[in-house]
Structure formats: C-alpha cells, structure tokens
Image (cartoon, grey):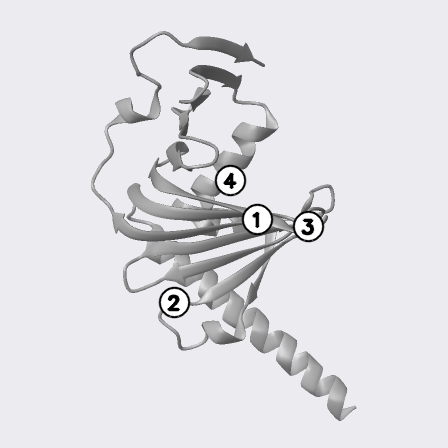
Amino acid sequence: MKHFILCLFFLSASSVFADDLKKKHEELFRGIDHVSLDFTQTVYKKLRNRSLDRNGTAHFSKPNMFRWNFTSAKLGNEEFYYNGKVLTHFREAEKTVTNYNTNIGLAKELNEVVNLVLQPQTLYKRYDVIPSEKAKGKTQPTITLKPKAPGTDIRSIEVGINEAKKFVSMIKIEYLDGNYTKFGFKNPKFTPNSLEIFSFSRKGKFKVRNHG
C-alpha cells in the first residue's frame, strides 16, 4: 500500500511539474517570431554504425518558414528553403534545384523542426512531456517528448532549452529503428528575417526538378 501511494505521489508530482514546464515554455517563446542560429547536425545510422556530421546556419520565422544552409566537405553545400508554399532543395555540387509540394513527408518533417525551435509548446498536443531529472533547477533544462498516438516512426524527441537566452539549444530525434538525428544550436539572433530569404533566388544555370 505504501509503495502504491508513493507511486501515485510521484506520478502526480511529475504531472504537475510537466504542466508547469509547458506553461513556462509557452510564456517563454510567445514573443519570439524570428530566430537565426549556427548549428551542428549529426545523423546516426544504426545499421552501419556510422554517423555523418555537418554544420551551417539556419533561419526560422513564424508560422512555418525556414532556411537551412548546410556545409559539408564530404557532401558539399546544400540549402533548404520553405516560404510556406514551396519547399526547395538546392545542391551546389550538382547544380540541381528540386521543388517539392508542401504535402510531402519531407516538408512536414522539416516544418516540425520549426515548431521545435520557435514554439515547442505547440507539440504538447501530440506528445507526452517527460521532464528530465536534470531539468529541475537548471538554466538549460532538457525535456523528452514521446508520441501520444501510434503510427509514427519517432520513438522520442529530446529538447534542450536555454531559458536564459530563450532559445532551443539542442534537438535529438530518436527513431524506432535505432537511428537518430541530433542538432546543436548556438549564437541566436532574434532580429526579423526578410521574407525573401525563404525563397530560392540564386542566379545561374541549374537543373530544375518538380515533385508533388
């Protein structure tokens, strides 16, 4: 009986702490409409037990616009643009421009990252929030998001938040197959982004493809 009561107390306390965290993050990110950051990315593939590291700069603006500039000595430079209507992928080495419809999975996944960076509280409707023990009393708490409903290949999402500077400093997306993608963010700037940067505008001769 004692263990049962302790279990109920723990679950209740965890629930209260999670609710407090949700409210805190909602207030924290409410006034942020734009952010630009430097980032590192690690993509791990369990089957080959290998990881690929890249870095670059990213720009995000509410409600769902983004631009990623990836640099990699191995893969070459890549850019992703999304202006709310068209997702464009540019590969510099191949001089190819690929436009995707917003309904495809890739656009939805990249848009999810915008939510994680600019307004993580919007994901609480679809994910259960599990505060990390190290979150309590720390300036950069970590929370774990787990899908509420089946039908996704995501096992969990770990989110690190720098509450002092009001930005998401880390995202780690773990998949059911053992793969994961991890982003580290730093040097945030909150000045408004020009909407023009979210549309591909490079000049030159490129091979253009359209999908979706």
- Work out whether 158 lies above or below 4: above
Label 3 sits on a secondary structure element that is: loop
Q: Earlier in the sequence, mark 2 or mark 4?
A: 4
Image-quadrant location for residue 64: top left
- How far, Cα to Cα, is label 2 from label 3? 29 Å
The residue that label 4 is drawn on is 112
Q: Residues within 10 Å of mark 1 (few under 14, many from 20)?
A: some
Picture residue at 51% right of the left edge, 71% below the top: 17
Q: Is residue 110 visible?
A: yes
The residue that label 2 is drawn on is 140
Label 4 sits on a secondary structure element that is: helix
Q: Earlier in the sequence, mark 4 or mark 1?
A: 1
Label 2 sits on a secondary structure element that is: loop
- What numbered label is drawn on residue 46? 3
Q: Look at the numbered discs 3 and 1 and tell me whether their residues touch, using CB distance below 8 Å.
A: no
Closer to us: mark 4 or mark 1? 1
- How far, Cα to Cα, is label 1 from label 2? 26 Å
Q: Residues within 10 Å of mark 4 (few under 14, many from 20)?
A: some
